[in-house]
Image (cartoon, grey):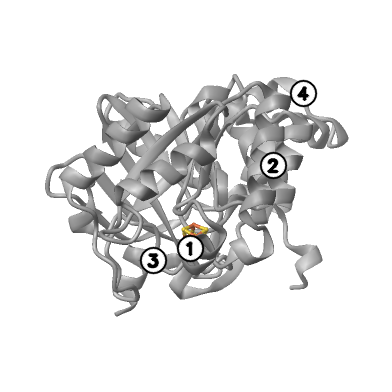
Amino acid sequence: MSAASVPVSLHDLTRAELGALFARWEFSPVHVARLWRYLYWECVASLAEMPELPAKVRRRLADETRLHTPGIALETDSSDGFTRKYLLRLEDHERIETVLMRYTGRVTACISSQVGCAMGCVFCATGQMGYTRHLTPGEIVAQAVHVQRVLRAQGQRLRNIVLMGMGEPLHNYDAVMQAMEILRDPNGLALGAERITLSTVGVVPGILRLAREKRPLRLAVSLHAATQPERAALVPAAKKWPLDELMAACRTYSETTGRRIFYEWTLIEGKNDRPGDARAVGRLLQGLPAQVNLIPLNPTAGFAGAPTRTEASHRFQRILAEEFKIPSTVRQRRGIDIAAGCGQLAVAEKN
Ligand code: SF4
């Protein structure tokens, strides 16, 4: 079957697009509302689980669309029970990671945007794997639906999404934005703008496009170093989009959207967790609406660095707060025992 003849995935379509499809087929809009409810409220996995749709509608959907539910290749819980990680199998048997996190009363899905990643951050298991392909909007949406299905069975609801799994979301801009539109739909998963966080390694054209289009989401930018040579050594993408261009784009983003940016800093012992590093990032971000998220390194086989010690991360935080009035958080390292750093489960499963 040629790519052109593959039936459209239902999870690829916004409600308006489904409406247009049903209008073309001369089916009542009532059926669109029912189908949408099955897809995003009940999170069903097959057309057979949609008894309220007339048989002729289900037949047409079966003939001309597809509804794929990713299989679970592996699933594992962290020992503290706060994190469950899924390795999901796609239709072409590629595998991606999706994580359900329950920190401080927040239920969050960490979802992937690509199979592998082209950005090559040296400390990241996904970066060490290299890039395979972009995910489709439906494959991004299906991860959130998977998590919602799990939560629904427990009487809970998905509240937050972070695009911090495998891949660089701004490298797959159109598919990610289509997926976010579907996930934000008020008659479906209804995730609000403040509930979706997109994390980028610093793809400057993508940040400027987000600003131009005023996309309703929260932006996190991975900094990890406050000088161009140090950053380029950790994040090869910095050679293409240097630090000064990145910071100019971040300024434009905040000025255009009125939103603050979350700056992510992976703390690596003795490399970027010293008082001088804290002061360098403080100077870099001074005057910008910013919050710094400090993340002790997830150790990976392909990188020799060690996670920072607790005292060093607290010292870093104190310097940012007292000398620069920049708020920061230290992300809890729960889930490390299940390889919760992005890409680590996929690598572990291959070995
Ligand atoms: S940290 Fe993110 S951008 Fe960098 S290689 Fe890993 S997945 Fe890609």
2 or 4: tag closer to the N-terminus: 4
> Can you give x and y, in whole percent of width and height, for residue 298 in the image?
29, 58
Q: Is mark 4 within 8 Å of ligand 1?
A: no
Residue shown at 49%/51% (left/top)? 226
Q: Nearer the viewer, residue 323 or 17?
A: 323
Q: Secondary structure at mark 2?
A: helix
Is residue 269 or residue 73 the one in the foreground? Answer: 269
Q: Amino acid at mark 1?
A: Glu
Q: Which residue is mark 4?
A: 28
Q: How many marks?
A: 4
Residue type, numbered disc 4? Ser
Q: Residue 19, percent across and down?
A: 77, 29
Q: CA distance from mark 1 to mark 2?
A: 18 Å
Q: Would residue 279 be visible to someone looking at this image?
A: yes
| Direction bottom: furthest residue | 351
Closer to the eye: label 1 or 3: 1
Asked whether the residues under the numbered discs 1 and 2 touch, taking CB atoms below 8 Å apart as contact, a structural biologist would say no
Local crowd size for mark 3, using a 10 Å CA cut-off: few (<14), some (14–19), many (≥20): many
SS for dot 3: loop
**Residue displayed at 39% across by 57% down:** 342
Picture coordinates of residue 120, whole percent (x, y): 52, 69
